[in-house]
Image (spheres, rainbow, N blue to C red):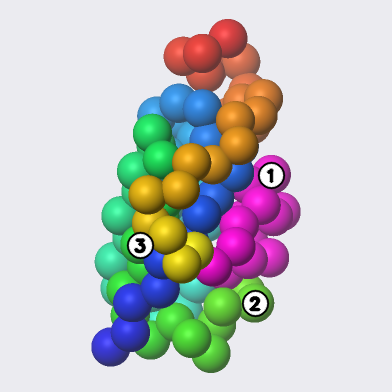
Amino acid sequence: METINLTVSGMTCGACVKHVEKAINSIAGVQKVEVDLASGAVKVEGYVTQHLKEIFAALEEDGYPAQVSTDVSSKAKSGSCKSGSSCCCN
């Protein structure tokens, strides 16, 4: 099993976190996803290295650009909420 740390941009509320978790969990090989909204850090566990492009594509499709993080405490850029009218930050 492998662990990768990502920095995901654009998350502004709990609904965004749920969207990111759902997008990543939809990828084969992913076994666990931990999202830290405040820092934009996302920890992904499983057999994920060979599916990294798919993870990035799923996040990008939902409006949450990501990159591999070498600093899990780095802050993600804030952006507009992607979860629609039910968002708690609108």
What is the three-letter code of the residue carrying label 2?
A: Lys
Query: As rendered, which of 31 and 2 lies closer to the eye?
Result: 2
Look at the numbered disc 1 and give the secondary structure of its residue: loop
* Above or below, 46 relative to 72: below
Query: In the image, what residue type sits under mark 1?
Result: Gly
Instruction: Point out residue 57 in the picture as x, y percentages from the top left corner.
Output: 68, 65
Is 24 part of what is drawn in magenta?
no
Q: Earlier in the sequence, mark 1 or mark 3?
A: 3
Q: Mark number for residue 53?
A: 2
Q: Where is 15 relative to 24, above or below?
A: above
The quadrant in which residue 47 appears is: bottom left
**Residue 27, image x, y percentages:** 50, 72
Mark 3 or 2, nearer chain start = 3
Q: Position of residue 33 (x, y in %)?
A: 33, 60
Q: Which residues are magenta?
A: 55-68
Q: Say few, some or many: other residues with alpha carbon within 10 Å of mark 1 (under 14 / 14 to 19 / 20 or more).
A: many
- Tell me, yes or no, whether the highlighted magenta stretch contains residue 67: yes
Q: CA distance from mark 1 to mark 2?
A: 15 Å
Residue named by callout 3: 43
Q: CA distance from mark 1 to mark 3?
A: 18 Å
Q: Nearer the viewer, mark 1 or mark 3?
A: 3
Task: Give the residue type that dot 3 points to.
Answer: Lys
Q: Position of residue 60 (x, y in %)?
A: 69, 55
Q: Residue at x 29, y 66 (%)?
A: 32
Q: Which residue is mark 1?
A: 63
